[in-house]
Image (spheres, helix red, strand yellow):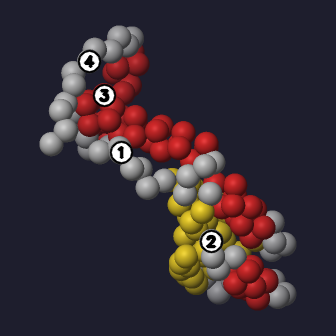
Amino acid sequence: MEELVRFGVSISAQLLEQFDRLISRKGYVNRSEAIRDLIRKHLVEHEWEQGDKETLGTLTLVYNHHVRDLPDRLEDLQHDHYHRIISTMHVHVDEQNCLEVMVLRGRPAEIRAVSDSILNVKGVKHGQLVMTSKGQGLD
């Protein structure tokens, strides 16, 4: 087990009260675990912003499947980028709309390029890319 280190933090009473309310709503049992999670989150974000390490991402998009040729264009793009898109999930939301989630792997610039090419297809209503890393060394 890794050695734990204690350190002090100076923070305004108001900010600490807000933080305590937030961590209580999120179900944390103590401040230490909440602070560890915040540090991990920022370290992971910094890692994928650097652009030199393998990154993972999820691309979620909503589209109307009745738009002419849109499902075929999206499928073609997924095949064009098969080396970056490692998994997909397709959900029929209602008679018109579909939700698709794609899991991507690669360097951040590669993932962003694939994501942009898909989100820019005419007929995609909304989409969002969320990137993360394997978080190595963040235990």
Question: Mark 4 or mark 2, which is nearer the start of the sequence?
Answer: 4
Type of amino acid at the residue the image marks with label 4: Phe
Q: Residue 100: x, y in percent? A: 60, 76
**In which image quadrant can residue 97 be found?**
bottom right
User: Neighbour class for label 4 at 10 Å: few (<14), some, many (≥20)?
Assistant: few
Disc 2 target residue? 84
Q: Nearer the viewer, mark 2 or mark 4?
A: 2
Q: Residue 15: x, y in percent? A: 40, 19
Q: Nearer the viewer, mark 1 or mark 4?
A: 1
Type of amino acid at the residue the image marks with label 2: Arg
Disc 3 to disc 1, C-alpha distance: 27 Å
Question: Mark 4 or mark 1, which is nearer the start of the sequence?
Answer: 4
User: Neighbour class for label 2 at 10 Å: few (<14), some, many (≥20)?
Assistant: many
Quadrant containing the C terminus is top left
User: Neighbour class for label 3 at 10 Å: few (<14), some, many (≥20)?
Assistant: some
Dot 4: element: loop
Dot 3: element: helix
Q: Nearer the viewer, mark 3 or mark 1?
A: 1
Disc 4 target residue? 7
Q: Residue at x 21, y 21 (%)?
A: 6
Q: Are marks 2 and 3 in contact (CB under 8 Å)?
A: no
Residue 20 got which mark?
3
Disc 1 target residue? 137
Q: Residue at x 69, y 61 (%)?
A: 110
Type of amino acid at the residue the image marks with label 3: Asp
Q: Which residue occupies the extreme left position in the image?
A: 1
Disc 2 to disc 3, C-alpha distance: 40 Å
Dot 1: element: loop
| Image vertical order of residue 95 relative to residue 136, above or below | below
**In which image quadrant can residue 78 be found?**
bottom right
Q: Are marks 2 and 4 in contact (CB under 8 Å)?
A: no
Q: Nearer the viewer, mark 3 or mark 4?
A: 4
